[in-house]
Amino acid sequence: MTDTPLLQLHGVTKSFGAVAALAGADLTLRAGSIHALIGENGAGKSTLVKIIGGLYRRDAGEFLLDGESVDFHNTREAKDAGIAVIYQEPTLFPDLTVAENLFVGRQPYTRFGTLDRARMRRETRELTQRLGVPIDPDRDARGLSIADQQVVEIAKSISVGARVIIMDEPTAALSGVEVERLMGIARQLRDEGRGIIFISHRFDEVFALCDVVTVMRDGSYVATNETSTTTEDEIIRQMVGRSVDNLFPKQEAQIGDPVLEVEHLTSAGVFDDVSFTVRSGEIVCLAGLVGAGRSEIARAVFGVDPYDSGSVRIAGRAVPGRNPAVAMRLGIGFVPEDRRKQGLAMTAGVQSNITLAIRDKLARLGFITSAREEPSARTWAARLQVKTFALDAEAQMLSGGNQQKVVLGKWLATQPKLLIVDEPTRGIDVGTKAEVHRLLSELAGTGVAVLMISSELPEVLGMADRVLVVREGRITAELTREAATPEKVMFAATHAAEAAA
């Protein structure tokens, strides 16, 4: 590494109206280093990244690149200076090929003035092979997995000579194998002398991959440490300003009568002969590997996805298939895995989102006013501690953790008998995780039945009264809270593969 940092920010501030998103952010990135940037949702990480990437301009503070002051007016200037941002959800053009996406806006031409597609294919093939993930240059981006789309984005950044590569929550939607592959690529980029900023809520990834970690809180710089000299507990204290001793605040609840009864539910090729019960006051978790069919079962119970045979009953009443509206009226709430695409109206306000599922109850003569929405929205926003400068602020302006709280508020406002939550803490910080866990435990304590889907074993073991392990569309094990261990859950989730081997 050289003495001069590759990138340096000091005392950076940024406000949106009366809201200070950054109140003194510092970050020093050196070439040949992977630097973790972490903090709770709303800590200012995304705002800082957008300043580095040229989307926002800072209000005050220093921004140096190779020791020289810079002030990007747009993303083009940042890209030209060698800065690339790889977002959690890639931004490829779906109807263009991989090669066309790689060269969009800078297509090469032959001496005859025609598009040099041969060169585009050749360089695309060389770049993806160099990253260890050969991808067909002529394949449409629409058919690529999230992991492969990220590889294309990284190849694109390399092709334009990016020296600073920012990865913003890149592993949130990836499988274990895909995460390992991405981490291998990040290490390769580091070894080539590039500087990597890695944003993640997953501490295991931070400690396995990163050389340095910077913590932010409430828009300000807190601390920078080498990962080899700090601990997870220390980072958590720095992030939240306190020790999160009880990440899984599971309180005892009175388990009552069956609320949800699923019998012999089958969807050909998706899940088969699924039967289980969730009782009042009980948290039941569907565990298993990604792709095992957990989300599909939940979506079928709520009526979003079809099924071929079987039955669903809520509080003794039959729930018809493919009819979420009836499921809602019968008392089922559903917090989906993808809050941005399925859980929220991103351009609508917090108030409108929270009251979305109860608008019929609030309406008079078919009309609804803000005055009728406001009391309910304010109640749930306050109870869930949603951080927003106004109830009419658009959902897309909130941090991921606050977006998740709004989705929860929307369904809690319906006063459900059964709440289905699919990956309730994915992509949110440790402090907000503890709040969501506390809320779910409190709901169970009031008699609500909770069906939770989670890929995080600590969450499964920490929150569930019973664990149902799903493998290849079948329930392969039912474990009580006392009997559930990481080994038993993983064995049930992978038993077929092991037996076959």
Image (tube, rainbow, N blue to C red):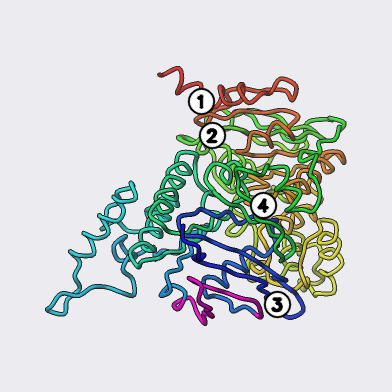
> Was residue 344 drawn as part of the magenta stretch in this picture?
no
Image quarter for residue 282? Answer: top right
The CA distance from mark 2 to mark 1 is: 8 Å
Secondary structure, mark 3, is strand
> Closer to the camera, 370 or 251?
251
Please identify the residue farthest to the left as the structure is shown: 112
- Quadrant in the picture for the C terminus: top left
Q: Do the residues labelled 2 and 4 touch (CB within 8 Å)?
A: no
- The residue under label 1 is 494
User: Residue 120, image x and y in percent?
Assistant: 23, 64
Secondary structure, mark 2, is loop
User: Residue 104, image x and y in percent?
Assistant: 33, 71
Could you say which disc has been placed on residue 428 in the image?
4
- The residue under label 3 is 15
The CA distance from mark 4 to mark 3 is: 23 Å
Secondary structure, mark 1, is helix
Q: What residue type is labelled 2?
A: Leu
- The residue under label 2 is 289
The residue depicted at 49 percent of the width and 30 percent of the height is 472
